[in-house]
Amino acid sequence: MKFDYARWLPYVLAALRIVTALLFLEHGTQKLFGFPPPARAMPTLMSLIGIQGLIEAAGGLLLAAGLFSRAVAFVLCGDMAVAYFMAHAPRGFFPIANGGDGTILYCFIFLTLWFAGGGAFTIDGAMKRTGAD
């Protein structure tokens, strides 16, 4: 009996989307609300890091819910690429040494979700089924 990978793909994509979004949301809540407690002082809201916190929180929520999944994944992919080159690359070439390995992983997971879509259990999919879009 052959395993049907195609049948399970939407559910695996949904798990990847939801887990990644919730982890990403946590970065945003740490910057915005100090939860979980950050190692450094919280940034002011209208600083570059404060705006990054807004992007992470809003993007994480939207992606977890599966609302505008592809568009949000595209924006977050670009956001992580910019974050890597602004914050990590200047500290050294190797991602493990400059602390950017997580940023690169987020970037490529969001790139994958942009191309593949959010999988099952999305608000986008529910709106298509009901004709609400």
Image (cartoon, rainbow, N blue to C red):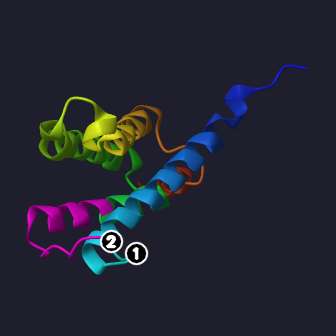
Q: CA distance from mark 2 to mark 1?
A: 5 Å
> Which residue corresponds to the image point at 46% horizontal and 39% vertical from the top-left?
117
Confirm whether residue 63 shows in the render: yes
- Relative to 86, does residue 34 appear above or below in the rendering? below
Instruction: Give the percent coordinates (x, y) of residue 19.
Output: 53, 54
Instruction: Give the percent coordinates (x, y) of residue 84.
Output: 21, 41
Q: Secondary structure at mark 1?
A: loop
Residue furthest right as drawn? 1
> Which residue corresponds to the image point at 56% horizontal and 51% vertical from the top-left?
129
Q: Does residue 55 show up magenta in the picture?
A: yes
CB-based contact (under 8 Å), mark 2 and mark 1 = yes
Is 10 situated left or right of 57 in this image? right
Query: Which amino acid does the dot numbered 2 rest on?
Result: Gln
Q: Report crowding for label 1: few under 14, some 14 to 19, many 20 or more residues within 10 A (C-alpha).
A: few
Q: Which residue is mark 1?
A: 36
Q: Secondary structure at mark 2?
A: helix
Q: Which residue is mark 2?
A: 30
Q: Quadrant of the C terminus?
A: bottom left
- Magenta part of the chain: 38-56
Instruction: Give the percent coordinates (x, y) of residue 118.
Output: 49, 45
Is 28 situated left or right of 47 in this image? right
In terms of sequence position, does the residue under pointer 2 or pointer 1 come before the other?
2
Q: Does residue 39 show up magenta in the picture?
A: yes
